Image (tube, rainbow, N blue to C red):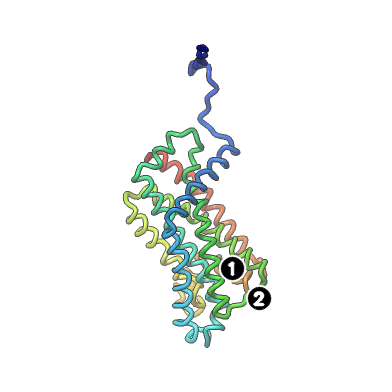
Amino acid sequence: MSAITLTPIAPAAERRLSNRTSLTQTVQNTFTMAYRGLVKIRRTPEQLIDVTVQPIIFTLMFAYLFGGALAGSVENYLPSLIPGILVQTVITTSVVTGTQLREDMDKGVFDRFRSLPIARIAPLSGALLADTLRYAIATTITFVVGFIMGYHPAGGLGAVVLAALLVIACSWAISWVFAFFGVVARTASSVQGISMLVLFPLTFLSNAYVDPSTLPTWLQWFANVNPISHLVTAVRDLANSGVIGGDFWMSLLGAGVIVAVFAPLTVRAYMRKA
């Protein structure tokens, strides 16, 4: 019978331990957690109802309600409506990020992740990265429904793809805000309530559906400085004209600032609460 050789365990003082992770490991951990999120979506496809049904309902409803009154016909209203619907739908979808995060924390899932030797930000950034698939689905369906209804973007396919990527990137950035709500709130329902309270004025009091010049003076000011209005304008310029204007760069800059502010806040609140 062969003897079993045991490897001695090195004392803690002699081990090369670190409480930091490299950028490479952080990226790897993030993609691993994102894959976990995709597996959850595959096993529970009903999670995609809001990104598959909502764009269709919103596009049909607003087009036929306001098309004749605001533009004379539905076809004339679509070049203005589709970018607005796209931004409003995808950003509204990002609210689910905070709600699901709160549910996972209530179940103790993130407590298990916290005990693993992985980057602290990975469970959060991975979950948010997986949600970009939801944004991509909502974006695709919105453009497809618009095309079926008669919307033909004059900017070309390349400009439409760039506009879609811009919306997805900005929605991913905004999802960090809702993730912060998911960490600090007590229940998933309160996360949704707080998020909608913030999101509804931003999306509806913008240039997504109407020309701000038709609004009262004080409301015009809010609509013009509203970051959602800048994003909608950037998408319209790209899809309808193929133009990359100042609103495009302003939207990207705003997305970067949101991530720079709320990503550290969310991770810090998560670690403190966990």
Q: Which residue is mark 1?
A: 235
- Residue 154 is marked as 2
At label 1, which amino acid type do we have? Val
Residue 114 figure quarter? top left
At label 2, which amino acid type do we have? Ala
Kindly state the secondary structure of the residue where label 1 is placed: helix
What is the CA distance from the residue labelled 2 to the residue labelled 1?
A: 12 Å
**21 in relation to 181, above or below:** above
Residue depicted at x 54% and y 79% = 149
Residue 91 placement (x, y as % from top left): 48, 62
Pick whichever, 195 or 218, lies toward us: 195
Residue 158 figure quarter? bottom right
Kindly state the secondary structure of the residue where label 2 is placed: loop
Q: Residues within 10 Å of mark 1 (few under 14, many from 20)?
A: many
Q: Nearer the viewer, mark 2 or mark 1?
A: 2
Marked residue nearer the N-terminal end (2 or 1): 2
Residue 180 placement (x, y as % from top left): 42, 50
Residue 34 appears left or right of 99: right
**77 in relation to 114, above or below:** below
